[in-house]
Image (cartoon, grey):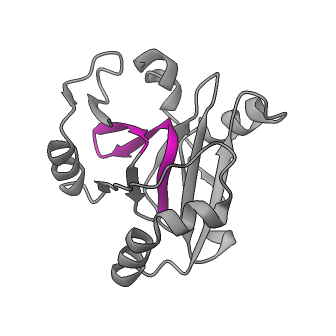
Amino acid sequence: MSQLFVYHTSMPSQAVKVLNHAEDISSTLARVGVHCEHWQTDVVLTAQSSSAEIQAAYADAIAQLKERTPYAMVDLVSMDEKHPEKEALRAQFLDEHTHTEDEVRFFVSGRGLFSVHIDEHIYAVLCEKGALISIPAGTAHWFDMGEHPRFTALRFFNSPDGLVAQRCEASIAQAYPKLDDLI
């Protein structure tokens, strides 16, 4: 199950709202332009499942997403505690940044925390298995995979260049709870 923690920028240590219900999370995020939904599948996947097997398991949902969005490419990103670059990769996305394309992730397994900065609020979305999140291009955000990462996610995009992070000049990300603080 996913969760949404909403913070006011004047109070980074205390959420002003915590939501656990999928419809409440989706509608709250939709009001600020972030799309979030939950996908279901009956196919059993394992840590050894290939990208092709995972994409086949979610083929209908992927096709429906592609019908209503411009995303031409799909790939798989996977991270666990044994990854030799886990600390460097975590640090790379902990600072507030933007992308020239929407950042779209579907969590096949595990979890991660996307924090989105819109006006005077931070929307921290704990994405777990089944969660799809789409953060609009140009929206300031950061991602935490935790000290002990464990996730597999499909990424949707049009060009690999659109996935390159562009750091924000003044990042407030360090003031907010990390993934390990929330679980």
Picture coordinates of residue 31, whole percent (x, y):
18, 55
The residue lying at 24 percent from left, 50 percent from top is: 29
Residue 140's place in the image compared with 142, above or below, is below
Q: Quadrant of residue 10?
A: top left
The residue lying at 37 percent from left, 83 percent from top is: 67
Residue 54 colored in magenta in the image:
no
Residue extending furthest toward the right: 84
In front here: 111 or 50? 50
Picture coordinates of residue 75, whole percent (x, y):
63, 65
Residue 165's place in the image compared with 2, above or below, is below
* Quarter of the image where the N terminus is located: top left
Residue 14's place in the image compared with 168, above or below, is above
In front here: 7 or 86? 86
The residue lying at 66 percent from left, 46 percent from top is: 78
Q: Quadrant of residue 36?
A: bottom left
In front here: 139 or 21? 21
Residue 124 colored in magenta in the image:
yes
By secondary structure, the bulk of the magenta-drawn segment is best described as: strand
Instruction: Give the residues in magenta.
Output: 103-129
The answer to whether residue 38 is visible is: yes
* Quarter of the image where the C terminus is located: top left
The residue lying at 34 percent from left, 56 percent from top is: 39
The answer to whether residue 100 is visible is: no
Residue 7's place in the image compared with 133, above or below, is above
Picture coordinates of residue 89, whole percent (x, y):
72, 39
Picture coordinates of residue 178, whole percent (x, y):
49, 24
